Structure formats: C-alpha cells, structure tokens
Image (cartoon, helix red, strand yellow):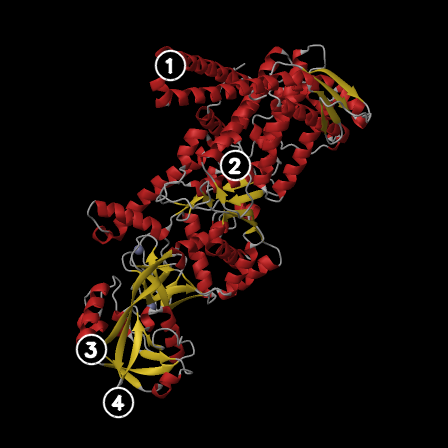
Amino acid sequence: MSEIPRAYEPGKIEKKWYDFWLKQNYFTPEIDRKKKPFVIIMPPTNVTGELHLGHALTATLEDVMVRWHRMRGEPTLWLPGTDHAGIATQVVVERQLAKQGQTKDEIGREKFTSLTWEWANKSRENIRHQHQLLGASCDWAREKFTLDEGPNKAVRTAFVRLYDRGLIYRGERMINWCPRCQTAISDLEVEHEDIVGHLYYVHYPLTESKGFVTVATTRPETFLGDTAVAVNPADKRYKNLIGKSVTLPIIDKEIPIIADDAVDTSFGTGALKITPAHDPTDFEVAHRHNLPMVAIMNPDATMNENAGPYKGLERFACRDKVLADLQDKKLLEKIEPYSHSVGHCGRCQTMIEPKVSLQWFVRTQPLAKAAIEAIKDGRVIIIPERFTKIYFDWMENVRDWCISRQLWWGHRIPVWYCHDCGKLTVSVDEPSTCIHCGSKQIIQDPDVLDTWFSSALWPHSTLGWPEDTDDFRHFYPGSVMETGYDILFFWVARMIMMGLEDTGKIPFHTVYLHGLIRDESGEKMSKLRGNVVNPVEAINKYGVDALRFALTTGTAPGNDINLGKSKLESSRNFVNKLWNATRFILQSLDTEKLESKSIELQPQKIEDQWIDSQFNKLVQNVTGLMEEFQFGEAEQQIYDFIWSKFCDWYIEIAKIRLRNQLTLSPLPLLVNILEKSLRLLHPFMPFVTEELWQSLKERLPDKDQMPTSIMIAAYPMVSDKAFAPEAERVMDSVIEIIRSIRNVRAQYKTKLTKWIEARVYADELLSGLVTQANIIETLAKVHPLTILGRQKREPTKDEDLVLVLKETEVVIPLAGMLDRLAEEQRLMKESKEINEIIAQLEARLRDNAFLSKAPSPVIEREKQKLTKLEDRLNRLHHELSQLNSSSADS
Ligand SMILES: [Zn+2]
Ligand SMILES: [Zn+2]
C-alpha cells in the first residue's frame, strides 16, 4: 500500500491522473439513444497567443458542469475546438514576416497562407496542452478547427443558402476600414480613443452671389469628396440659401445646399459638409437626397485621382497641404481645439477610415426576428436573466452584418465572377464554368468571410452539419453555451440566428454568461498595471485545483471576479487541509482494518448522526445550487462543510474515540463521509480528489466493487433517512458550548494545559448533552463538568461567569481562572511604577544644578540605582511576553 506523502505536491499528480483519464477514454461519451445527453460545445479558442485567465475560467466552469453531469450518469459530450481568428492571426503572422524584412505581398497569397497554417497548427497544439493542464475533460477525439473540412463546408453551405433566400447581398456600404491591414473590420475590432484634435472652420464661396457658407470639420482634407452642404430646414440663418449652391475651393466644384432634419444646428456653424463616401452619417444623408458618392482615398489611405492636385499624398500629409492652401486663399476662418472620439484598429492601432466600399452583407432583421422569439418563448434561457433585456435591445435594432474581409486568412467567399457574361456563380463546390453562360473564364472573389461567420455556425458545424451525421442527430441542440457576457451580441446572438436558420432548431437551451476577471481590488487586469495573473504561473505555484477553486468560488453568474494572491493562497490552504485530513484517516486505516460493508452502517452516536445529517443537507443544497448554475455558492458550501464541520469538529471529536479503544470506532463513518465529500468536490478540484480517493480506495475491503476512477463514480445523492434534526440540535449546542468556553479561556489568558470547572444548565437538552459530556470536557479542557437540568434562578455569586447561549447556560467559576490575569496585572502595575521612578532619576541626572552641587558619591549612587531599575524592567517585560505567548491560540 502506497504511503501518502506528508505534503501535497500538485505537479506530481496532475499529469498522472490526466493521462490515466485519457487512457481510460472517459472523455468520449457513448451514444445511448435511451439517455438524454448533456452537451457543451466549447467556445473556440483563438489560435493567436497564449492562454489567459479568461480561458482558464471558461475551461473550469465548463469542466465543472461536464464532470457533474457525467457523475450523474448522463452521456456527456464536451467538444473542444479552435478558431482561425481571421484578422488577429493574419496580423500576428504579418508581424513575424516584418521582423524578417518581408511583407505578405512579397511572398504571395499561397505562401502566406501556408505559413499561417504552420503558425495555427503550432498554436492549436499549445492550446490543447494548456486545456489539458487545466484538467478539461473534453472529448479530444472530436476536436474541431473552424477551417477544418467539415466546418468549412458548413460555412459555404450556409452562405449559399442565405444567398439563395435573398438574405445575403453585395452592396456599397459604410464600413470601418483599416488602411494598414487593408480590410474592413467589425465594430468589435475598433477601439475608440478620445483625442484632442481641432475643429477647422472653412469658407465655401457661394456660386451665384457674393459671400460664403462656413462649415466646421475635424477632417478638412475630406472636402475633396464633398457632394453637398446640408442645413437644418428650421435653421433661420440659412433659410434663404436652401436650393442654392457653393463652389468647393481649389478644385472648383459646384455642390448644392440641401435641407435635412438630421443636421444638428448646435454643431459648428450649423452648416454641415456632406462627404458620403467617408462618413457614416453623411452616407445616410446622401441616400435620402440621392447625392453622388465620391471616394477620395486608395485602400492604403493615400489620395486617389478624385483628389485632384493632392493625388498620391498620404491622408495626413494631404490635410497639412489642404490647410496651407486654404490659408493662402484666406478661406480658413479659425481653428478651435476639439475633443472627439476616434476609432483605431484593434489589431494594429492604425486610425480607422470610415469608407464606403463594395462588401457582402447579411440581411439580419429577418434572422433576428426568429432569434428574439426563441428567447421570448423560453426555448433559450439566458443566465443571469438581466442580460435578456440587453439582448432584446440589440436584436430589435440590429443592422445588416458586413461579412466580407479583405484578408487572406479565412473562409474564401464561395462566389465566382464571370468574365464573359458578368454574372455571379454562387456555389458550395468549386465550379469549373459559369452557370449562366458556361464560360470557363470565372474568377473567385478574393475576399474571405468575417471570422464570426464561422463562429456563428459553431454549434452545428462541429457536429457534422450539413451532413446528417449520428453526432448531429444525437447531440444537437446542445445543453449549455457558456461564454463571457462581453460577446453576447457578436457571438451568442448570431449562433441563435444561424442555428435557427440552418437547422430549424435552437443551437442550445441555456446561455450561461460569466463575468470578467479583475485583480484583488477590482481593477481591470492589464500589462500596464502589472496586475495580470498568468494562469500557467499560478498553476506552477499553487496547483491547478487551487487555481480552479479561486476562479470560481463565491461568484455568481455574470458578475465580475476578483482574483489575486490571497484568494489563490486560501484555495491552496483548503487543498492542504483536505490533504492532511485524508492523511490522518488513511493512517488510522492502516492500524485498524474495516470490515466489508461497514462503511454503509447506520450511524449510532449523536455526533455521527449529526455529521451524516449535515452532509446530507450539504448534498441537498449543492444539488439545488448546481441545477441553478450557482457553482460559486455550491463550492463555498462544500468548502465550509469540509473545513469547519468535518475537519475542525468531526475529526477532532473522532480522535477522542480513536484514542479510546473501548467505544464504538468512528472510522467507518469517517471513511464514509470523506469518500462522499471527495466525490462532491470532484467537479471543482478533479486532481486532488482523484489522488486522495484512489489512496482511500486502496485501503477499503470492497475496493473491487468500486469504480476505477472518481470521475465516473456517482455524484452523492440525498438520502431522506440521513436527516437527524434532534442530533443536529444537540451538536449545535455542544459546539456552541465549546466555542464559548474557549472564548472565555482566551479572554482570561488561561494556560492551554489548565483544566477549568464548568456547569452547564441544559434544560431540554439534558439527556442529549450528557452523552456528549466527554466531548465538551476534552475539547474545551473542562473538569469537572457538571450538566444539570433547568437553571435554578439563584443569584449567582459575583465571581461566577454566566454565559447565556441559545438553548443552554454555562456557568464558569472565575476563581480558578483569575490568577493568570491577576499575575499579568501585577506585572503591568510594577513595570509602570518602575518606569515612573526611572523617569525621575533620569531627569535628576540631566539637571545641571543637581550635578554641580551634589557630591560625586551621591551622583554615583543615583546612577547605580538607575541601572538596577532598568534591569528589573527588562525582566518584567520578559515575564509579560512569556505570559502572553503561552496563552496564544487558546
Ligand atoms: Zn489594422
Ligand atoms: Zn457567364
């Protein structure tokens, strides 16, 4: 039988058990058509970069759910996967190329894509490894990547179906354009930053008469693309000018003055320059008034031929030149400082250029309607519920979704353009000819799809859709989608829309949203602040179980989580406490053998019934909490039970009986409660529970009938016959009595070894407390202990201390306890007196009048006196500190 080591060393056991679970194939469910499966499709991890705490949180929460359901006997599938992460990955690889002095255009699309595949494969390996470190019990045999053949076919199929239904179209729309990445990017990928810029007031001369209109703009260079000046029809200042025209300076172009209700009269001068191709609001104004669009920039944000004399200039150089020219012509009225929010590319920090371009869009409103219904009628539930309103707000105002990206890394858009007839062939499989004219001169759209397009199909594409696979039929829809609340719209909403659209069914029944992780003081974690906790470092230092526990204990769904050193340390302390308790029980088992089946015995003694009843209550609470997704509270209750009730009370009580061979042994019940507690804790702390459970199992007589691993053992169930309210009442009182006597001892600094006397007036609990007298005596160090019935209301003597407790009264004669306190007071008093005399002596020895008049033997005597007193004071201090240290932790 293997010895259980003195200290818990997580690193040694984690790999051992993960490999064991993998070898036993526990993570792969068997398809049993008679049983309803529990299914989580893991949010695909981006193949960029390292695992951070957010991933660790996701992996932990999902693993908790999955292990719990598996232990409840449900066929359980947790399907892991990774996301190609479009622009994010492409930028990482471009940066690597740049370090070698190369660009993607130099090496070409094919070479670049193969380099990116190499990077992605390495990264996927790393992600898989890190999830295994965390103990994630997901089915690696079913692992998917968004660019795998299956999900790729799903993407093309979904595109073609939407196109055929008229829900995908190509059109000119305003998008966020990154001139460095040279692609459209989603709103999510734009970071807004407040900057202090300038507001330039520019004169536009009237065409037919003298005078001018002044417009205010933050981007004067865009005047080259203006196609109108708009004023509010209610604005008296400009009433007479509506319908007239102005001539753009420098390029001498005539543009109309129009009226539009959307013009804000308080901004600038109230006359707004309209640049439809480079501003989202202007784009909409232009649509209402049928204005032309004039794009003035190339994809790299240099000026194009529409910029006339400025053609070829970079956008900011152009601004400088435009300002200088306007100044020359005395058309620049004034410049004011102006703070405004400017969008930057989230990947490369380049300033975003709003731009009209020809892109592919999904008509989202018809899809959103069905997705709103699914939440309204309760087919999909969002936890916590408060996010439901946010979901509706967003979905009811949803805008068309730009799905094309000018990137090389991703799902190529399945559209081919015909050189001969100009028509489009939209097809799942690569066509060899144009379906309209049969021409072989067709060329595929160079763009790829937004990475969220494939993510939106993730719940069904991972299970084999559009093929009618066993997995799809058995595991779709999934049970829970667990993710961060920050991507409710970008991802969760789109999965619901696309799941309903493609399969006619909701993709999952429950959406569980977790919060963001902050540092101990609630601050956002950032590299700049230096408060980032690296999960791999935390694992090395505290162990996986402690990290998992710290991440999830005591938190509620959707709430942000504070994590730092102290939480990690207290989680590790908990693991150590469990380890030491188990070690004690195992050592007892090595000296006293259990008889077969004895761990199923019905508890006899009050304390046994109490712990059994308390455990049963815990199981009842935990089961309820888990069903309501309150994992943090479930963990907190398990922690409280194991730490306090089991370790601090029951084991200490059991030790009394273990020392006394004549009474009934508590060992069967110790083993029973420990074994069940380990199972209860397993979903949260898989490694240490498996290690301890296996060591325990080795020592049990019926080990051959037990499962091969705790992870496939049954989760504890409530047993009605275990509830023992009467035993709980007695033991609650026993604990309260011991606690209050201990408090009194601490207060009076009673020596740990000293026995004190106590009387307990037990009232109704008399018969119960009498049976527990030995426990009170030993744990409160009380002798003699007298337990009496009803308190006779005789006046108590002054020197008796009376503790009025919930159901009992405890009387402690103070006589035996006071000596220590009196001793302390005596020492304090003496040292105070000596201090005063010392102060007087010192004052005299500093007094020049005394020193000059007194004979030297007198001065010498005073000095000796001082030295003696200082010696005495030192000895007093020493005695006092000894007195205090010997009464500590009593
Ligand atoms: Zn960029
Ligand atoms: Zn054709």
Q: In this figure, which residue is indicated by the disc labeled 1? A: 859
First-in-chain label (3 vs 4): 4
Q: Residue at x 72, y 10 (%)?
A: 662
Q: In this figure, which residue is indicated by the disc labeled 4? A: 209
First-in-chain label (1 vs 2): 2
Residue 790 position within the rendered picture, expressed as x and y whole percent measured from the top left: 82, 26
Left/right of residue 458 with respect to residue 851 in the rendered view: right
First-in-chain label (2 vs 4): 2
Q: In this figure, which residue is indicated by the disc labeled 2? A: 28
Residue 735 position within the rendered picture, expressed as x and y whole percent measured from the top left: 68, 26
Residue neighbourhood size for the residue with mark 4, other residues' Cα within 10 Å, grouped as few (<14), some (14–19), many (≥20): few
Q: In this figure, which residue is indicated by the disc labeled 3? A: 330
Residues at marks 2 and 4, CA–CA distance in whole angstroms: 82 Å
Q: Is 526 above or below relative to 545?
A: below
The answer as to whether callout 1 falls within 8 Å of ligand 1 is no
Instruction: Name the one closer to the observer, 620 or 358.
Output: 620
Q: Which mark is residue 67?
A: none
The answer as to whether callout 2 falls within 8 Å of ligand 1 is no
Comparing labels 2 and 3, the label whose residue is closer to the camera: 3
